[in-house]
Image (tube, rainbow, N blue to C red):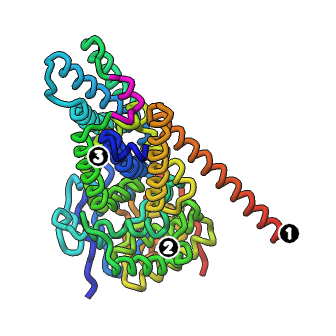
Amino acid sequence: MLMNLFEYEFLRNTFFTGIIIGIIAPLLGAFIVVRRLSLIADALSHVTLAGIAFGLLLEKKTGAILITPFYSGLGFSIIGSVIVERLRRVYTAFQELAIPIILSGGVGLSVIFISVANGFNTDLYSYLFGSVSAVSRQDLYSIIIIAVIVCTVIFFLYKELFLLSFDEEQAVVTGIHAKRIHFIFIVLTALVIAASIRIVGVLLVSALMTLPVAASIRIAKGFKQTIIYAIIYGETAVIFGLVSGYYLEIPPGGTIVMLLILLLIATIVTKKVIANINSRKHRLKTG
Amino acid sequence: MIKPIVEMENVSFHYGERQALSKVNFIINEGDFIGLVGPNGGGKTTLIKLLLGMEKPTAGKIELFGQPIRKFKEKSKLGYVSQKANSFNSGFPATVEEVVTMGLTSKLGYFRRLTRQDKLHIYEAVEKVGMTDYLSENIGELSGGQQQRIFIARALVSDPKLLILDEPTVGVDAENVEKFFDLLHELNQQNISLLLVTHDIGTMTHHASKVACLNKTLHFHGNPNEFQTLSKDKLSDFYGHPLHLVTHEH
């Protein structure tokens, strides 16, 4: 792949996209996990699928590309994120209810669009599980813009987002506009999902946001370290997952996620072993 | 001259139909250490919410540092340690330093990041509560009493003039409660006024310079010795049920 990387544009696009989402997905994922919203990413990715299906349907019915599936997916994802925030306010005591509502709504819409279109020429399979050859130059540019937006917002709102995740009451007392920050955050999530979907696919995009954090939280001291380790895990899995997916002709969503799970298991086991050795040493010392 | 930093005049508050506070007049002066006691549901937490601007009074007037509360913008002058501070998710990956840094959020405002000066300030606050050795530990790995100190450091880091503590000793063992009050006295001597909410009247009369007893209305507001000489019956009246008062001998 590395040799072909310079030869084929589509591979270059995929590779750069991979490197970008390997950073922004775990970065946002760290906030998602500590706010106990891990499943929100899943709900929004299914809404994104409905958007993609809608774009493909328009393309098939009109014969012209009015809006590429990337943008229709992005649009649906953002609308979905706004509805999630609204629903969470309606069901303050059962905030997780927003997730099944949005998730099933996304799948329902997707099924309708797909059957109205009577199937697509484009490989829907690649949308579900990711692909190494799906990122156009246009998509790459959009993804770069998304990454710049996400990183800038997190950089400037880091302390507000962090306080809000840790202690919402204190955040409100401090004078933070909790609603606005929640809203900005969920829109960022929608952006990252739309950016990641071509590589890891609808069904596995939430894994790229949460699994690296699940591994890093086991070993990190503090939140910044959690983010840094999560990005290292995410980036490692994306790069090796893309390369192995390319050679094995497996959708990269599968290889990336399985690599993440291996990394997660390795982290948990290593930590256990080290803890055991330490406690044995301690016991020997204290005799 | 002693300046009042909090003035509540005829403040009432309703949650829908239910009245939580009725015509409360309450003053906190600079340098005060006030213990606010009263039965559960007596409106202690409501009073704090009003002071912090989380709720608006249904009637009456509140002034903070000589300004009407609507116009009061210097939120960093108020430090708040919530009753729920200890009930955070203990697996949350945040170091002591990161938690204390949160206290600067309002002072810094949006889009601003920490300067070296701010960092020094954070270390000072952690030192004040005697937790310097734990700066890079995860907060969830500390004991309840230690966590309490960290949350106080978080409130101190913005240089508050008034520190409000809501049931801060719940879940802290007896020995650490004593240390905790020593710390509060130190802070009080550094000219930080304290408002401490508790249902433990005994410790309160022992430590505070003034006691206020709240059950919808303010029944008593003054010297703790006078408070102790109130007859048991009268106290039970305030509380609405018989009361066993444990006094602490010096």
**For this view, does A146 lie left or right of residue A133?**
left
Which quadrant would the N terminus of chain A be assigned to in this image?
top left
> Type of residue at label 1?
Gly
Q: What residue is rendered at 46% in x and 44% in y? A: A210
Does residue B126 appear to the left or right of A182 in the view shown? right
* Residue A276 position in % (x across, y down): 74, 57
Q: Amino acid at mark 3?
A: Leu
Q: Is residue B34 left or right of residue B168?
A: left
Circle 3 is placed at which residue position?
A188
Check residue A132 for magenta coloring.
Answer: yes
**Residue A177 vertical position relative to residue B6 in the rendered view, above or below:** above
Q: Are marks 2 and 3 in contact (CB under 8 Å)?
A: no
Residue A20 drawn above or below residue A246: below
Is label 3 on the same chain as label 1? yes
Residue A3 left/right relative to A65: right
Q: Earlier in the sequence, mark 3 or mark 1?
A: 3
Residue A282 visible in image: yes
Element marked by disc 2: helix
Amino acid type of the residue that numbered disc 2 sits on in the rendered structure? Thr
Residue corresponding to mark 2: B205
Residue depicted at 20% across the width and 55% down the height:
B59
Q: Quadrant of residue B64?
A: bottom left
Q: Residues within 10 Å of mark 2 (few under 14, many from 20)?
A: many
**Which residue is at the front of the view, A7 or B146?**
A7
Above or below, comparing residue B83 to residue A114 in the picture = below
Residue lying furthest right in this view? A287
How far apart in space, not on screen, are marks 2 and 1 (Cα)? Answer: 48 Å
Mark 3 and mark 1: Cα distance apart in space = 54 Å
Who is closer to the viewer here, A184 or B103? A184
Which residues make up the magenta segment? A123-133
Q: Residue at x 49, y 61 (%)?
A: B199
Q: Which residue is mark 1?
A: A287
